[in-house]
Image (cartoon, rainbow, N blue to C red):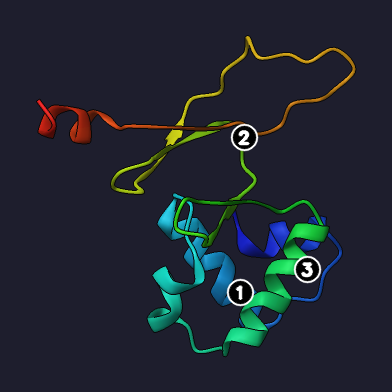
Amino acid sequence: MQIENIIEQKNLKLTSARRELLEILLKENKPICFEDIKDKLTMNKATFYRNILKFQSNDMINSFESNDKKRYYELQNSPHSHFICNICNTIECLKKIDNIELEGYKVMDVVFKGICKNCLEQSR
């Protein structure tokens, strides 16, 4: 998806910071936190979070907090769930889980926490 199209659909101004942030989110293709990409950014921390908030308020990205108390962000491409390992803090994107329904609610994101396959194998 073209960055210009994403911005245009939301009636936002395309700034260099927004372009840079969207390029990183598209390239990473996984949930990321500020600490993961701060060395790749030309913007400061305040500009990063200001644009993240703008993207969130325009339903462009999803976010969630992990076990490490960091907030992770990803483009809102398709609804899916995440698995966070309680031991190694690895975050995995899971395919959409269709059978989770709550009457009267619209479920958009589910975060599972437990022990990943690698940590389970290492403990045996």
Name which residue type carries label 3: Lys
Residue sitting at x 70%, y 74%:
51
Look at the image and tell me whether residue 16 can be seen: no
Of circles 2 and 1, which is in front?
Answer: 2
Q: Earlier in the sequence, mark 2 or mark 1?
A: 1
Of circles 3 and 1, which is in front?
Answer: 3
Whether 39 is drawn above or below 80: the answer is: below
Q: Earlier in the sequence, mark 3 or mark 2?
A: 3
The x, y position of residue 19, in whole percent, is: 61, 74
> Which residue is nearer to you in this view: 90 or 68?
68
Look at the image and tell me whether residue 65 can be seen: yes
Residue sitting at x 21%, y 35%:
119
92 to the left or right of 52: left
Name the disc covering residue 32, or none: none
> Which residue is nearer to you in this view: 38 or 23?
38
Please name the residue that numbered disc 1 is placed on.
Answer: 19
Please name the residue that numbered disc 2 is placed on.
Answer: 78
